[in-house]
Amino acid sequence: MPLAALPAWRSTTPLSQQHNEVPRETADGPMAERRRVTRRNRSVGGNKNPAALENVHELIEGQFKITERVCRKLNRATLDPRIIGDHLTYVDNQVRSDVLVFFLHGLGLDHRDFEPILKRLPYRGVSPTLYGCELERRGRISLSLADHVVILREWLRELVEQCQPRVIVMVGFSLGADMGFELLLGPADEPGPAIDAFLSLECNLTLDTCFCSRVLADLAPEHPEISIAELRRLGDLAKSLDDWLNIHEYLVKVLRKFQGDIGVLQRAAADIVRPFRDGPGFGVFAPGFGVRARASACSGWCSRMTQGQASHLRG
């Protein structure tokens, strides 16, 4: 049961007296400047380093239109026509740099997880939200992971044509890391933009690493009730307090977002888990290691990064 909202506090001082209590100041006065610095301070998590404050970037939201051309590359057997003409949303830190870094989020999450990094990243940084995973979207349309990868590849292709970066760096977390390998592979007849470096964070290696996905994959879209016993079992897998907190924070975040509209989450989770249930564990990871040629080039570029440059990517 949700907690009742606390009653709003009201001042007993008459409004006319309240105005008289606060001295007037200009927009350039000392108090105004102090408030501006405080707001900037909060935007970087309370960092009071003046150099850091100067490097906080404003994030803007961009949109990539899912045109008929893009939809022709999706699975026609499962294509929902409502997706034609809709948009993939992403955030952009607008930094002028010849290095483009893009971040891919985990299952059920969105670009907000990377906003603190994007605000202080010294390179051009962008992060898309997978179609159907937007916070405010109503009437979500579920897509296969293969179709998500197609849309991401076309989005990246358009972005690269606009930015013309010298270096492209991909950072993927969990599901985002899984999709990162698919982006590296790409179709032979129409490869995507060449990715120079790939930072994979907590990608799925075996069925044992899919502990949240396994529970979500077993939901029935027509009966999306989640067993409390299953959720409790997930908590029991935690080996430390930090693990326990991370698991429950994640579950609360995604289940609140998709409550009553669980199909997108269930389908993505099922696609994550299926190869590991059908195949021999680690052998599913990066099939045949066909990414070795590109991965070797990626690791070579990463090895030349300074410690400070790499720390920006890790956050």
Image: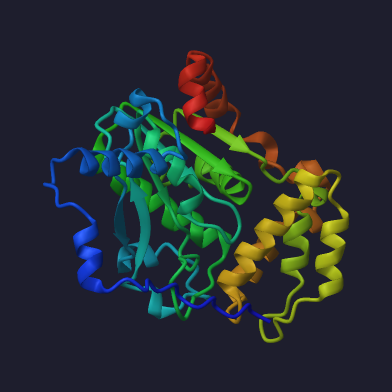
Q: Is residue 4 left or right of residue 166?
A: right
Residue at (45% x, 21% y) in the render: 309
Task: Give the quadrant of residue 303.
Answer: top right
Q: Nearer the viewer, residue 55 or 33?
A: 33
Q: Position of residue 258 (x, y in %)?
A: 58, 73
Q: Nearer the viewer, residue 7 or 86?
A: 7
Task: Give the quadrant of residue 221.
Answer: bottom right
In the rendered image, the quadrant that contains the N terminus is: bottom right
Residue at (45% x, 75% y) in the render: 8
Residue at (45% x, 64% y) in the render: 131
Task: Give the quadrant of residue 53.
Answer: top left
Q: Position of residue 240 (x, y in %)?
A: 83, 43
Residue at (61% x, 77% y) in the render: 259
Q: Nearer the viewer, residue 183 or 69?
A: 183
| Colour convention | rainbow
Does residue 44 appear in this view?
A: yes
Q: Nearer the viewer, residue 252 or 92?
A: 252
Question: Is 56 above or below relative to 176?
Answer: above
Q: Position of residue 185 (x, y in %)?
A: 53, 41
